[in-house]
């Protein structure tokens, strides 16, 4: 009788260990398949937020431009991920992000308002560079003492006037 009782206890422990192992395997499979999808969703959200931020930035730059010399607008930027670059020579503002999220077909540029959006393939399979760009080449001369922005940033956009094209200056507040 003692032998049967210890055998039943052993069966319970073996069953418990097997159920725990099966649960761990299922949890690992779920995490392995869902983490890349979660990363893509985070990147997509980052792209959408940056599109909105760049549309707001563009609206403020165009408002300062249209109001004439002396006009100023403060704006708060919060760049989560990616590279945000203000290029004085090209009068462009560009944001880029390396991601597994595919924003558009590679090498095809499309516009949303004044914002140009395109995706380029990278040498790494299923990894892409996403670009968002505002181009002011024929509208203004963009000047700045800031070249790259990351994280939260307060900037001031100022119309300094100009002879042929107005000088729009972006500086940190």
Image (cartoon, helix red, strand yellow):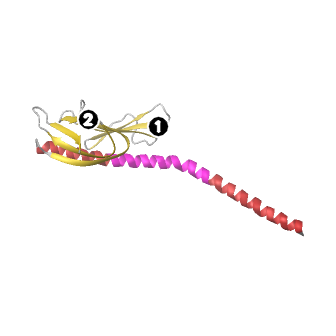
Q: Mark 2 points at which residue?
A: 92
x 17%, y 42%: residue: 158
Image position, residue 137 (x, y; %): 21, 33
> Is 56 on the left or on the right of 5, as rendered?
left
x 26%, y 44%: residue: 113
- How far is mark 2 from mark 1, CA to CA? 25 Å
Residue lying furthest right: 1
Earlier-in-chain disc, 2 versus 1: 2
Image position, residue 16 (x, y; %): 72, 61
Image position, residue 133 (x, y; %): 30, 38
> Is 91 on the left or on the right of 78, as rendered?
left
Q: Magenta residues: mostly which secondary structure? A: helix
Image-quadrant location for residue 95? top left
Question: Quadrant of the image for the N terminus?
Answer: bottom right
Q: Do the residues labelled 2 and 1 touch (CB within 8 Å)?
A: no
Q: Name the residue under label 1.
A: 127
Q: Does the magenta stretch include residue 102?
A: no
Chain part drawn in magenta: 27-50
Depth check, mark 2 against mark 1: the one in front is: 2
x 80%, y 65%: residue: 9
> Is 12 on the left or on the right of 27, as rendered?
right
Q: Residues within 10 Å of mark 2 (few under 14, many from 20)?
A: some
> Is 42 on the left or on the right of 144, as rendered?
right
Image-quadrant location for residue 173? top left
Residue lying furthest bottom: 1
Image-quadrant location for residue 90? top left
Label 1 sits on a secondary structure element that is loop
């Amino acid at each position: 009788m003692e032998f049967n009782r210890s055998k039943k206890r052993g069966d319970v422990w073996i069953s418990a260990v097997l159920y725990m192992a099966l649960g761990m395997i299922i949890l690992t499979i779920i995490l392995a398949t869902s983490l890349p999808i979660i990363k893509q969703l985070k990147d997509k959200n980052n792209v959408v937020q940056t599109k909105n931020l760049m549309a707001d930035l563009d609206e403020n730059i165009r408002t300062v431009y249209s109001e004439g010399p002396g006009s100023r607008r403060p704006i708060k930027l919060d760049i989560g991920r990616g590279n945000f670059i203000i290029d004085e020579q090209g009068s462009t503002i560009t944001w880029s992000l390396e991601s597994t999220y595919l924003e558009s077909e590679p090498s095809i540029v499309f516009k949303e308002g004044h914002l140009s959006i395109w995706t380029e393939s990278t040498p790494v399979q299923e990894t892409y560079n996403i670009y968002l760009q505002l181009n002011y080449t024929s509208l203004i001369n963009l000047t700045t003492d800031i070249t790259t922005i990351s994280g939260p940033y307060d900037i001031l956009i100022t119309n300094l006037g100009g002879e042929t094209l107005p000088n729009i200056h972006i500086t940190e507040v």
